[in-house]
Image (cartoon, rainbow, N blue to C red):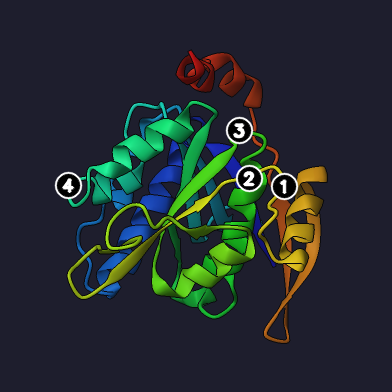
């Protein structure tokens, strides 16, 4: 039994620190020592939201992901990661930011839950779920090969106007990342029906327990995706300032 909960980064710095440590450990295990989405500046960004996977006592962290919103104190990770390779990404993000855009990033899971769908299925689902609370209309992602299918399942498609028809060598020369975009966060019209239904269920009832089945294995997940202090986010005016 695990818990997947959402919060704004600046509201729980202790959990953010656990996230950073776990993410760095996973990256080091695959030989990556520096990656833009693993920097810790996001912890102090008022436009960064965190999804964390932990035990029910909140003592152990098994994985996490973030939704970062354009207009915060830092550029989106996809801009930081690929802008020096193709500056068109800046104009693309700027265009979508007017209506509210962000990025799913920093997705990881520990070896303890490898193969359970934490890092691909359930975290992606949770990030897309909370994006309507944050008032986003679109979402970017820079996907490793093994996360492309899950992104497509929730409605993403390749962003072919940047890089080499959407691909980049990142975070190192022997790894390929694919730029993707979800253009209808509200409706997820391109998404797989079963996955879209799961997202819509969580949006309607963000605090619930579900028995999830993946590869014929069952996993009890307590979702707590109602973002605390969400009114403070609305009052921040970050997206409204971009509209102006």
- Residue 68 screen position, x and y as percent: 45, 39
Determine which residue is flagged by label 3.
134
In the rendered image, which quarter is residue 194 located in? bottom right
Q: Split into 4 quadrants, where in the image is the N terminus?
A: bottom right
Foreground of the two, 104 or 123: 104
Q: What residue is at 22 percent from the left and 43 percent from the top? A: 87
Determine crowd level at label 4: few under 14, some 14-19, many 20+ residues with C-alpha closer than 10 A: few
Q: Are marks 1 and 2 in contact (CB under 8 Å)?
A: yes
**Disc 3 to disc 2, how far (Cα)?**
14 Å
Which residue is outermost to the bottom? Answer: 216
Q: Secondary structure at mark 4?
A: loop
Q: Secondary structure at mark 3?
A: loop
Q: Are marks 3 and 4 in contact (CB under 8 Å)?
A: no
Q: Secondary structure at mark 1?
A: loop
In the image, which is nearer the foreground, mark 1 or mark 3? 1
Determine crowd level at label 2: few under 14, some 14-19, many 20+ residues with C-alpha closer than 10 A: some
Q: What residue is at 46 percent from the left and 45 percent from the top? A: 103
Determine which residue is flagged by label 1.
187
- Residue 55 screen position, x and y as percent: 61, 60
Q: Is there any visible trace of residue 78 in the rendered image? A: yes
Q: Which mark is residue 84?
A: 4
Q: What residue is at 76 percent from the left and 65 percent from the top? A: 193
**Disc 4 to disc 1, how far (Cα)?**
33 Å
**Disc 1 to disc 3, how far (Cα)?**
15 Å
Determine crowd level at label 1: few under 14, some 14-19, many 20+ residues with C-alpha closer than 10 A: few
**Disc 4 to disc 2, how far (Cα)?**
28 Å
Determine which residue is flagged by label 2.
184
Q: Which mark is residue 22?
A: none
């Amino acid at each position: 039994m695990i818990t997947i909960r959402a919060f704004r980064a600046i509201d729980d710095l202790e959990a953010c620190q656990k996230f950073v440590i776990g993410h760095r450990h996973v990256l080091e295990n695959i030989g990556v020592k520096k990656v833009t989405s693993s920097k810790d500046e996001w912890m102090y960004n008022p436009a960064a939201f965190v999804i964390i996977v932990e035990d029910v006592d909140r003592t152990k962290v098994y994985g996490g992901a973030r939704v970062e919103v354009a207009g915060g104190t830092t550029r989106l990770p996809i801009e930081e990661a690929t802008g020096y390779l193709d500056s068109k990404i800046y104009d693309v993000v700027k265009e979508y930011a007017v209506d509210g855009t962000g990025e799913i990033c920093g997705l990881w899971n520990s070896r303890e839950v490898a193969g359970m769908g934490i890092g691909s299925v359930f975290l992606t689902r949770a990030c897309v779920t909370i994006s309507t609370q944050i008032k986003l209309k679109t979402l970017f992602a820079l996907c490793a090969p093994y996360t492309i299918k899950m992104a497509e399942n929730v409605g993403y498609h390749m962003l072919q106007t940047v890089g080499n028809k959407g691909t980049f060598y990142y975070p190192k020369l022997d790894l390929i990342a694919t730029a993707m975009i979800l253009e209808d966060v509200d409706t997820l019209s391109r998404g797989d029906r079963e996955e879209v239904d799961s997202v819509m269920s969580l949006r309607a009832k963000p605090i619930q327990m579900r028995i999830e089945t993946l590869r014929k294995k069952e996993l009890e997940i307590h979702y707590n995706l109602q973002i605390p202090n969400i009114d403070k986010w609305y009052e921040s005016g970050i997206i409204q300032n971009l509209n102006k």
